[in-house]
Each structure stands twice: as C-alpha cells, then as structure tokens.
Image: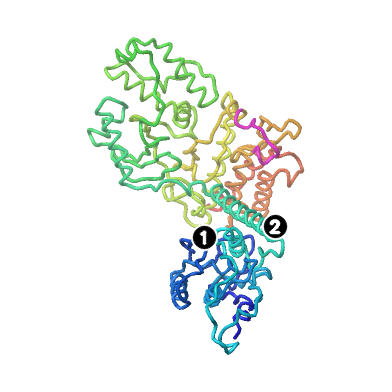
Amino acid sequence: MPRGAARGQDHPQFAHGETEAESKTEPTASHPPESLTLRTADPGPRPASNIDLKTPGEKESLEFFGGLVRRKWLGGLLRVLPAARSAPGPREGLLLTALQQRRFRTTCPVTPPARDRLPPPRHPAHQSPASSGVPASPRPSTVPPTNLRALRAEAAEPRVRARGAGCGSCRSGPGGAGGAVRCGRARAVACAAWTAGWVLAAALLLRAHPGVLSERCTDEKSRRILAALCQEYRGGVLVGDLCEDLCVAGTLSYQRCLYYERGKKVLQADWRGRPVVLKSKEEAFSSFQPLSLPDDAAEDGGQDFPEAELLLVVAGEVRNALGLELPNGSLGPLWPRRRGRRWLGQLATLWSLVQQEEFVLFSLLQDLSRHAPPVLGSCGHFYAVEYLAAGSPRHRALFPLDGAAGAPRGGRGQAKAISDMALSFLDMVSHFDDDFSHRLHLCDIKPENFAIRSDFTVVAIDVDMAFFEPKMREILEQNCTGDEDCNFFDCFSKCDLRAHKCGAERVNSNLQVVCDKIFRHWFSSSLRTSAVSVPLQLQLRDAVQECADPRGTSGSAPGAAPDVFWKLQRLLQATQRELQEAEK
C-alpha cells in the first residue's frame, strides 16, 4: 500500500469508554464537567525540539520511536505532526505510520476536524517498496526536520477541546481558538451553576435542621467537661454554690448527655435524688470574655474594688444581653452574697454567667413567672434548673403525658390533657405579652423548647431566642430588599422598599406562632372522641385556623386578630366542661 495513501487516511475514531451510568445520562449542566475526560496517559517528557533524520537505519529508527510510543512518551505526537505544512521524509513517514496504529480512548467519539487529518503525499518518491516494486533507497530528505517545540501550542488546543463538557459540544471548526474560548466559558458557567446548586441545598438543609452540624453528644466528653470544671474549682479559678456537691461531696452526679448545639452544652444530673439539668453556653470557662479590673484591684484580689462600679459593669452587661435598663435592686439574684477569700473567683464566675442571656433571663424571672424554670444554683459557668421532659413531634400529644397527674388514658383523657395544655399556652402568651414592662417575644417556638409539669403547666425551658421589646426592635431593624429579609426565625417584620429598611415593629405575635406550630397539630383534625360535640370541635378548628393565618381568614395584616385569643379560650373552656360532664 502506498505510504502516501496511509497518510491520507483519517485518524481512527476514538473508542467508547463510557461506564454504564455514563451511557444512560446525557452530559448537561447538572453533571460536573469532570465526568467527561480523556483517558489517555500523560505524554510525559518531550523529545528534543527537532527529530534527528540521520539515525543509522530505518529498523533502528522504528525500534527507537516504537519504544517511546510503548512507554507513552509520544501520546500527543499524533496531533502534532499532521499540523506540519511540509511533506515528511521517508523516516518520518515510517514514524507516522507507526503512530497511526495508536488508539486513544475517550468517553465520547470525537471526529478530528479536516485540518487535523494527514496531508496527501507531495512527491511520487515517497512510496512504500510494496507499491512500486522497486526497493526504496535510503535517500536524504530535502524537507527540514519538524519543529515539535513550535507545534506544541497548536497540539494542546485539540486536547483541551476534547476534554470539554460533552461529546462534540466543544469542537471548533476552522475558528479553532474561538471554539476553545466558548467551551471554557460554557464549562465555567456549568461548574458555577453546579456549585451554586449544592450551596443552596446545604443552606436549605441547615435552615430546616440547624442541629445537623452540632457536635456529637457523648457521655465521655460530658464527664471530661465536668472534670475540667472541678479542676478549675480546686485551683480557685471559679466558684459556685453547687461546686462542693459536684466536685467534693458527690451529691450532684452526672447522669447523661441531653444535647450539644452550637457550643451549648446541656447535661442531665441527679442532685440529692432530684433530677436537674446543667447548662452552659460554652464548653470551657476560658471561652468567656474575662472581667477587666484595674491592675491595683487585681493585685489584692479585687477586695478594694468599689461595689458601685461593679454594679455599673454588671448592669451594662445585662443591658447588652436583654436590651433593658434595670435598677440596681433588680440585680439581687445575680449579685454575690458576700466577699470571701475567693472574691476574684466570684467575680470571674459572675462575669461568665451574665454573658449567658438565658441564665440572666431565668434569674430575673425567678419569682415572677410560673412559665420559666427557676435557677437552682451554679458552679462556674454551668447553672442548674429543674429537669422537665421536653416536647417532641414524635409524641402524639407533642408532650409526654406519663408523668402528669393522673396520667390520662384513652381518647377522653388525652383530649382533656390537650385542652389543659392549650389553656396553659394561652396563659403563657398573655403573661409574656402583658405582665412585664416590655413584651417578651419568643422567636423559636417549637415543642422541643417547652415542657409541662405534672399539673400540665407549660414551661419555656429554652429561651435563647427570647427577647424583650427593646432588643427585638434592635434585631429586626436591618437592611433589606424584601420581606423575607426581615424574618428572624419566628419573629417577622416588613421591609420598607423605599428606605430598604426592615420595620422595627414585629408584625406577627407569639399567639399566632403558637397556633401555627402547636395548636394546628392538636386541633387541625377532630379530637376523635365522642365526649366532645362535633360542632364544638369544628368551631375550635376554625378558630385555630383564624389564629394561625389571620390574613387568609379576614384579609387583615398578620397578627391582627385581637379577639381570637378570647375565642380560643372560650372554646377550650367549653371543651373542658363537656369532658367533665362525660365523666359523670
């Protein structure tokens, strides 16, 4: 066969290398561009810039270059040599014939453009011995050697195009470079869209399940945290009225880990036969900002530091935490009882506690609210409150009823328990709205943040997202481009599109969120008990719907349902009367 004819043939088609999954899925923007890549080996080190045409003998030349091909050093040379604009000599012809037997594999068939095909022979002398019948004499070529260094740039272009996003999507015709640029841009856009999709999915997951990135709650780590706490107590770094029971007497003993969430540690313990909960915003005492005292006051253990100045410092921290200006007399639950030999440790402990908003709120509500657990004591930065079983969507009634007085049984008993808890929720909402100088807003209302006592009284056991009116206005008043930018968990505001500022006033209410997230679960369907009349159940369901979505029922602004509270209270009291009559 003439050697020129061999050069005139097209390059062999690339073999298919798809996996089973790739063969069923077309390459789109949703698939990473990396799923379509060439499977050729790295060309590796390049030979010298010019091919030596004076190799002694054709056999030795073929063995030399054949060895290079077998070692995959000239994997990319097939695309380099056809780009030469001059006819190759006889030894180059043998090299090209050997290289044409090379087969490259890729994930999709790529047809080389016309300019990449081998040119036809330019001289009749370049024929194989078999075609002419005359033995070919080794004559020197008049063609200068092919410069590989000058052709590498052009050889790199088809490799980049072949590795583009999709079969044929990045091929360029005579334009060449323009096609490669378009391919690069399309690949960058596809990669950016794919990345943005994953980021959006992760953001939605974290919004729906904020605890997905929380630390694993283990007994081993919890015991290690308490051991470090006791070590610092023995060293005089911190104090507390529960430290002796925890670290010396052993009457306050660890039971189990409840949860870790965004640094917060919540542990269950037994205190002289009474279940309690130990809580702290941070794991380590050193994680809290230390109290800065003048050098002379720190040297004598803070004994001579004026109490009036300490009161001002603590009041300022409380103001930052709650947004309230409190008189000095209101700080009694937070203030150390007396100055002892560990006065500096007392100040450090006090300072770590007032940096925890939940501790400050529980302490101030100590004797003012039946819907907040009292603080039983503290050791360092951990404080103790009474243990109450938290609610959960897994419970049919949202809250465990086993520990309630006269544990309700059957549909009638459960209906009575639900009506009692619903009335207690209404009482809590009214209490937080009206019984303080400023309204207390609950911005994270869900069953897990509440518990019930044995008499069905509802208790807010997690108030990290509870804010009095001044702090709430400060949080809501932010920049915005739409109403969705003004939503802070369960506390909503509206965006002023002219000023691009969220309104400082909350537009929904505690009652509306309680109806939406608690009452809907109880009353969206019938109570499924014959002890309550069907008309009363339907009225209760409609009232809950009106409370949860006032705009959908009355067309008014969110939260504008001043009489729905009394309607719900009246219907729940009527439910209780019917249940009591059914028991007789």
Which mark is on residue 49? 1
- Could you tell me which residue is drawn at 70 percent across and 57 percent down? 178
- For residue 350, the mark is none
The magenta span reads: 474-486
**Amino acid bearing label 2:** Gly
Q: Which mark is on residue 178?
A: 2
Give yes or no for residue 149 being in the magenta stretch: no
Q: Are marks 1 and 2 in contact (CB under 8 Å)?
A: no
Which colour assignment does the render follow?
Answer: rainbow
Q: Position of residue 121 (x, y in %)?
A: 65, 76
Q: Position of residue 154 (x, y in %)?
A: 61, 60
Position in image of residue 512 (x %, y %): 64, 41
Identify the residue shown where x is 42% and y is 32%.
374
Give how far across and how far down residue 436 sits, in percent. 56, 26
Of all residues, the one furthest to the bottom in this rendering is 133
Q: Looking at the rendering, in which quadrant would you find the N terminus?
A: bottom right
